[in-house]
């Protein structure tokens, strides 16, 4: 029994969500390798080799894997899957795209977005937008799994001595190509792994007003989140959306500003340790999950909070 | 070009989910059921491509017992030209669904398979990717814009860091995200018209697909509920609580 963990990265650095997937892998069994697929990703492989307990790091460095597109990534992983009982990846957009394709190529099912491991064949996962929690088993010879990274702590890293091996069987399917990318560059922490998240909703009112939310986020060194309503209204980009179909977060502190609390949004953040809600409607559903609620006009309260935090932080 | 649009019958997205007393599953008895919202967006996109002259025909396909005719009629009322129902007693696993859809897509020679990115019941987000893998076709998942140019589909995808546009060689599989479009409302005459549109029926055996199962749901539980906390009266009190009680700042 051996698990292959697929690394999440941008060809330069290993994303910390990979370590959450390693944690899930360690609950399945002790033995694991890490697969790095990319282009010019040697530094990522070096980082992966330092993850505590990793046996080997397999690196497929190829033009066809520059964007880790599903067609080439799944085919490359298929070519390297032999000998593994489990293939585990963090549930990032890249892996959600590629892993089901890999499962189909291997002729097996996939267990999506697990939040718990009860042994090598039994897993826990939310269904119905987190309104029900299912325990499922799989009898597939290879278990292909994506991991809800907010549900697992980061595995320790730094003491690993994994052997880095290049594989030369990357596959170029020639089925698709990337035309363009608009990837937001930000100095702020990554939404999926930040310890504090500040999110704005429809109540923020405009793209300009979102600057208030950003200022508060920066004061707390927090990642910036948003509700679907705020993204749909064009206040902020889709990459900030928290919720059932956006990103799932579970920070130490989640500050929801001008967010009413639709169940689809709650599904993305109710695992947070402490939730603060600021809303002008005292009956908003967000208060049913908030540890601390502050009722009032966010346009006054948010700058005041930002200013007062400045004096205590 | 024909567009195949799979649609799934799921709990209506406004309905509160109940768990069965015995903890075996979600209780769907006497529950309002609808087309999965992402499938509805996929139907809408297919119709727009047909209305723009890019596609010639929109075919809805639904897997399930007779009752799923309700969702088939909803897709036909939106404007799909015809439908196919694959008769099965219970919802198969995603891999089997993908195998069934692959057979239908081959039979129909579909140029594009436009489908929802995930169903709001099982939240798997698998079938489109599996279907593309089985058929050896390109995939454009989490689509927020779809354009057909020549023999390619240009798909703008919502990815973790922002947006990515890919060019896919047709035939291709595209899965719809929420911001792809706003589905139209159907009018009464459309619903009447839908009843006269053809619905072909087939089975897994006819399609040569074995309905296997490798996953089992052992139990379903309600999630841990959060207790509502307190309302604080001022920003000062909030800062104090965060610092001294919750100790998160």
Image (cartoon, coloured by chain):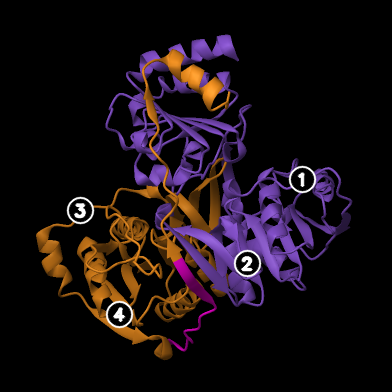
Chain colours: A purple, B orange
Q: CA distance from mark 2 to mark 1?
A: 23 Å
Question: Marks 2 and 1: which is nearer the front?
Answer: 1
Q: CA distance from mark 1 to mark 3?
A: 52 Å
The residue to which callout 4 is attached is: B65
Q: Position of residue B210 (x, y in %)?
A: 49, 87
Which badge, 2 or 1, comes first in the chain's sequence?
2
Q: CA distance from mark 4 to mark 3?
A: 26 Å
Q: Position of residue A109 (x, y in %)?
A: 56, 72
Are the residues at dot 3 and dot 2 in contact (C-beta closer than 8 Å)?
A: no
Quarter holding the C terminus of chain A? top right
Q: Is residue A30 left or right of residue B88?
A: right
Question: Marks 3 and 2: which is nearer the front?
Answer: 2
As helix, strand or loop, the secondary structure at mark 1 comes to loop
Q: Do tags 2 and 1 sit on the same chain?
A: yes
The residue to which callout 2 is attached is: A144
Given residues A203 and B20, the one toward you in this image is B20
Over which residues does the magenta segment extend? B207-219
Chain letter of mark 3 equals B
The residue to which callout 1 is attached is: A156
Q: Do tags 1 and 3 sit on the same chain?
A: no
Residue visible at 69% across and 43% down? A15
């Amino acid at each position: 029994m051996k698990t292959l963990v697929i690394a999440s990265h941008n060809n330069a650095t290993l994303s910390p969500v990979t370590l959450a997937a390693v944690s899930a892998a360690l609950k399945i069994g002790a033995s694991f390798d890490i697969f790095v697929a990319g282009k010019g990703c040697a530094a990522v492989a070096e980082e992966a080799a330092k993850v505590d307990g990793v046996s080997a790091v397999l690196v497929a460095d190829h033009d066809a894997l520059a964007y880790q597109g599903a067609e080439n990534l799944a085919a490359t992983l298929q070519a390297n899957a032999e000998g593994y009982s489990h293939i585990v990846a963090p549930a990032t957009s890249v892996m959600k795209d590629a892993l089901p394709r890999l499962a189909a190529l291997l002729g097996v099912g996939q267990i999506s977005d697990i939040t718990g491991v009860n042994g090598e064949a039994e897993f826990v996962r939310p269904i119905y937008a987190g309104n029900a929690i299912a325990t499922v088993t799989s009898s597939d010879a290879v278990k292909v799994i994506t991991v809800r990274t907010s549900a697992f702590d980061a595995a320790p890293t730094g003491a690993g001595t994994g052997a880095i091996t290049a594989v030369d069987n990357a596959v170029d399917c020639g089925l698709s190509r990337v035309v363009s990318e608009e990837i937001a560059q930000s100095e702020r922490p990554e939404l999926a792994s930040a310890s504090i998240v500040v999110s704005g909703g429809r109540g923020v009112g405009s793209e300009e007003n979102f600057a208030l939310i950003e200022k508060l986020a920066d004061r707390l060194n927090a990642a910036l989140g948003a509700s679907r309503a705020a993204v749909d209204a064009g206040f902020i980009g889709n990459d900030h959306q928290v919720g059932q179909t956006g990103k799932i977060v579970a920070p130490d502190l989640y500050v929801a500003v001008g967010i009413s609390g639709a169940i689809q949004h709650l599904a993305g953040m109710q695992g947070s340790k402490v939730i603060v809600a600021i809303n002008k409607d005292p009956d908003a559903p967000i208060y049913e999950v908030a540890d601390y609620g502050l009722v009032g006009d966010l346009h006054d309260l948010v700058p005041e909070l930002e200013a007062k935090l400045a004096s205590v932080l | 070009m024909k567009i195949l649009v799979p649609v799934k019958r799921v709990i209506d997205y406004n309905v509160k989910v109940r768990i069965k007393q015995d903890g075996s599953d979600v209780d769907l008895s006497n529950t309002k059921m609808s087309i999965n919202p992402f499938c509805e967006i996929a139907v809408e996109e297919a119709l727009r491509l047909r209305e723009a002259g890019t596609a010639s025909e929109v075919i809805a396909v639904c897997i399930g017992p007779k009752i799923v005719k309700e969702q088939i009629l909803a897709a036909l009322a939106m404007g799909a030209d015809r439908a196919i129902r694959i008769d099965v007693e219970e919802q198969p696993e995603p891999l089997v669904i993908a195998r069934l859809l692959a057979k239908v897509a081959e039979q129909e020679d579909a140029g594009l398979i436009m489908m929802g990115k995930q169903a709001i019941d099982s939240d798997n987000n698998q079938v489109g990717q599996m279907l593309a893998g089985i058929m050896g076709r390109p995939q454009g998942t989490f689509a927020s814009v779809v354009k057909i140019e020549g023999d390619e589909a240009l798909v703008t995808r919502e990815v973790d860091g922002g947006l990515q546009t890919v060019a896919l060689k047709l035939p291709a599989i595209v899965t719809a995200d929420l911001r792809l479009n706003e589905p139209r409302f159907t009018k009464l005459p459309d619903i009447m018209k839908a009843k006269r549109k053809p619905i072909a029926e087939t089975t897994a055996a006819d399609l040569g697909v074995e309905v296997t199962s490798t996953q089992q749901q052992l139990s379903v539980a309600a999630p841990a509920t959060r207790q509502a906390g307190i309302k604080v009266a001022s920003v000062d009190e909030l800062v104090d609580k965060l610092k001294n009680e919750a100790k998160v700042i």
